[in-house]
Amino acid sequence: GRPARDVLLRSRPPADPDREHVFSVSVYRVRNAAGRTLGLVATTVDVTARERAQARLRLLHRAREMIGRTLDVERTARELVDVTVPAFADSAVVALTDAVLQGKAPELAALNGEMLLRCAAAGSTRADHPPPPTGSTLLPALFGPKLPSSVTTLPAEGAHPGSTPYGPRLVAPLSARGQIFGAVAFERRRGGEPFTPGDVDLAKSITTRTASSLENALRFTREHIVMTSLQSWPIGQERQTQRAAEIAQRCRPGGSGAGSWFDALPLPGARVALVVGQVERPGLSAVATMSRLRTAVQALTTLDLDPHELLARLHSTVLRLAREQKSLQGSIDEPTVHCTIAIHDPVSGHLDAARAGRSLFAIVRPDGTMDAAPLPMGPLLGGDGPPFACTSLVLPEGSTVCLASPAATREQGPTRRSLAAALAHPDHGPQQMADDVQHLLAPDRVLLVARTRHLPPDEVAQWNVPPELQSAGPAREQTQTRLQEWGLDIASSTAELVVSELVTNAIRYGAPPITLRLIRGETTLTCEIDDAALTAPHPRHAKATDEGGRGLYICATLAKSWGVRYREDGKTVWAELDSRTTGPDAG
């Protein structure tokens, strides 16, 4: 009782038995006023032209997605065959010149169309007509009397070796800018439908795409593969840093190997480090230097250094890399690097930043006001060196921090007015802001947009600790109470022991004021103790008869990680416990 609408059926109608047609059929039930079924009404519409046009569009879209994905000549030829067989033809043969197969520059198109061609890829759906083997020399008859200079259709006549007849054929050159890379021959079964003018246009678009991909493969294969392997972008950072900031990252590719990079690195205490940098003088050497500097940044952030101290260490690293390159390669230009580092603390709302060079750095507050130059430009890493410009700001929740690698020249970079027009929209999310700013960047530049967050009050617990040894007991009790409220899967004895040792060490070796802070994470608990002393804590190897000296060793054993970071007015010792941590007597 349900009508069938627009059902597509394929058949060969008696009026045109040599061609398959596509019909749109709809069938409806006919009833009288009493509801009795009288019969059926069927309508049929020939939609062959529409369906074939849509099929050609789908095939062209697939060709643009599939062909040229790699910078390899033979794989590009294979991609052409995979796309067109059997969707476009029953068999396809891609032939390339010897020069192209050997990775040499392609030849200019010969006036007489005569040149040696070898099979680079072939495919066929016909069991009685196997394709030629890869690497074999192809007979000229496959492409007609001579190598075509444009897309050409050939009649269904002639014979392959072994008296195998040809079906309808379409041959097309693979050429770009007067250079010939080879040719491709498409064939349909004997008695099959001939190629139409629409098929000719489709083949021209596909072969043009293939020729362009072959040209790129020959020109950029070696350097592109090396730079691609080095210019690896971080993944999964949105998940790791989302408690501190909502991150949006963009890269505008250009293929020149500019040596730009960005990082959003999670730090202890729910903090996040935002890093954007770029090596001067693009090329393969710049990408290699960028890769080594990224590794250095990730290693240095584990030391809990301030941003300007991080830049100072990176400056020394760049100078060392320059000396190594000079000793290995002789006299070359020493690398210099633009870099901006910003560290956001979601507990206090502080943003500490330092800048080397002229990387783009802007801050948009929730009320829409924008500071396009919160830091002055500083010397390049590997150039004049420290001191680097630095600042410490307290940002309200919902502020947006925008970092981007600089353009090659000031004229290529975004103007202050265009940047303000793209960023001064606090109602836009980071992803939309990144989209608005991305088109302002020069090619091969990276962009990082972060919307700051503050931890909710119920995820942070903080107490002032009196500088007395008896204070360790109340600190343990407060820790146990807060763990029960939070419901973290952490043994209370483990957390109490770590807190007790941190508080005791701060009282004995630190200076007041002393503050204990607990930060709740999704799967972790961070215990921090602040004091006003700048003495460096270090684990001791206590003897069996010693009554003390095991505090930091206990913390390092029970905690997932621990460390210390310094401030102008003191230091913070922290320990991070995993929620899957068991009690000290679990073993």
Image: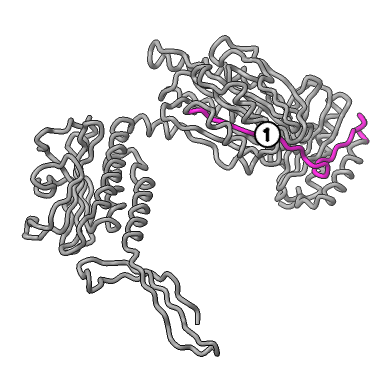
Q: Position of residue 42 (x, y in %)?
A: 39, 77
The range drawn in magenta is 444-470
What residue is disc 1 on? 425
Asked if 276 appears above or below 460 in the picture, the reply is above
Q: Position of residue 216 (x, y in %)?
A: 32, 34
Using the rendered image of the protein, determine whether residue 481 is visible from the camera's viewpoint: yes
Quarter-of-image position of residue 173: top left
Front-most of residues 435 and 408? 435
Which residue type carries mark 1? His
Q: Residue at x 29, y 49 (%)?
A: 202
Residue 39 left/right relative to 149: right
432 with respect to 39 (left or right): right
Badge 1, how many Cα within 10 Å: few under 14, some, many 20+?
Answer: some
Q: From this view, report whether residue 156 is shown above or below residue 314.
A: below
Image height check: is 492 above or below 214?
below
Pick the residue in front: 93 or 469.
93
Say if residue 543 shows up in the picture. Answer: no
User: Is residue 461 located in the magenta-colored stretch of the structure?
Assistant: yes
Q: Secondary structure at mark 1?
A: loop
